[in-house]
Image: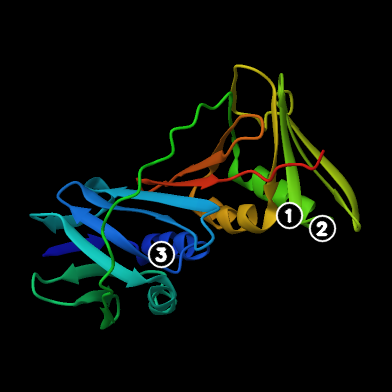
Amino acid sequence: MFKAVLADSRVWKNVIESISTLVEEGVFLVDPTGVRLRAMDPSRVAMVDMELPKATFESFECATETPVGVNFEDMKNIMKRAGSSEKLELEKGDDEARLKLRFKGKSSRTFSLPLLDLSKDELSAPRIPFNVTIKTPAGTLLEAIKDAEVVSDFVKVNAEEGQLKISANGDRGEVDVVITKESGEILSMEMKEPAHALYSLTYLSKMMVASGLSEIAAIMFSTDMPMRLDFNLASGGKIVYYLAPRMEAE
């Protein structure tokens, strides 16, 4: 069994929203160290890797590894009922096929979510050599992605010395967004060599939901290779996304 308490229910609400943009259902693995989940979207183009360590919680009890399979749309609908000043208790008994979500504020409200019998085989994190790692304010990256969406369904990400360029073009027009060290919007940059790649804006836009959880986004990629996008949660823990590239036509 396990029982965990979050002082602010909005933390779990935002985490579930960030996962559910890509994944319909999945298995949380709860053990004495915390809660984690790794799952791929149905098309297997993107992966989400979430971890909330024990220290994220106000209290945390779990003796042995406990798989918790859920439908994320159902959980998201429950979390929409979370109040801004309410605590959240998560609880599952050893022989129970339901997860209890209890909101504690002016009143105590308990929802029971039926659990799914899903395989708990954990996916391996991709082992990808990244030639570029850039940290930038999450809000800056979010605005660049929104700009690109105005004109296209795909975005080209280009890293050169001292700058990150987000560009898109299509029947609706063209846009270039340049983020530089000089402007202070590149907080750190590690580059073995310049890199560029094309990615789906549909997926990147979904991933940027997690920008509400973190002030800083870390972007890692190499030429025509998958992107890794990291968000470290202010409350502790992290959400990491991986996105396969779209190959440009010759």
Q: Look at the numbered disc 2 and give the secondary structure of its residue.
A: loop
Find out whether the residues at labels 2 and 3 contact each other: C-beta distance under 8 Å: no
Q: Residue at x 8, y 74 (%)?
A: 95
Q: Amino acid at mark 3?
A: Arg
Q: Look at the numbered disc 1 and give the secondary structure of its residue.
A: helix
Q: Which quadrant of the view contains residue 184?
A: top right
Q: Look at the numbered disc 3 and give the secondary structure of its residue.
A: helix
Find out whether the residues at labels 2 and 1 contact each other: C-beta distance under 8 Å: yes
Where residue 233 appears, as percent x and y from the top left, is 42, 47
Packing grade of label 2 (10 A; few <14, some 14-19, many >=20) is some
Can you identify the residue that label 1 sits on? 146
What sort of colour scheme is used for the picture? Answer: rainbow
Query: As drawn, is 111 to the left or to the right of 231?
Result: left
Q: Which quadrant of the view contains residue 186?
A: top right
Q: Quadrant of the C terminus?
A: top right
Can you identify the residue that label 3 sits on? 10
Q: Earlier in the sequence, mark 2 or mark 3?
A: 3
Q: Nearer the viewer, mark 1 or mark 3?
A: 1
Can you identify the residue that label 2 sits on? 150
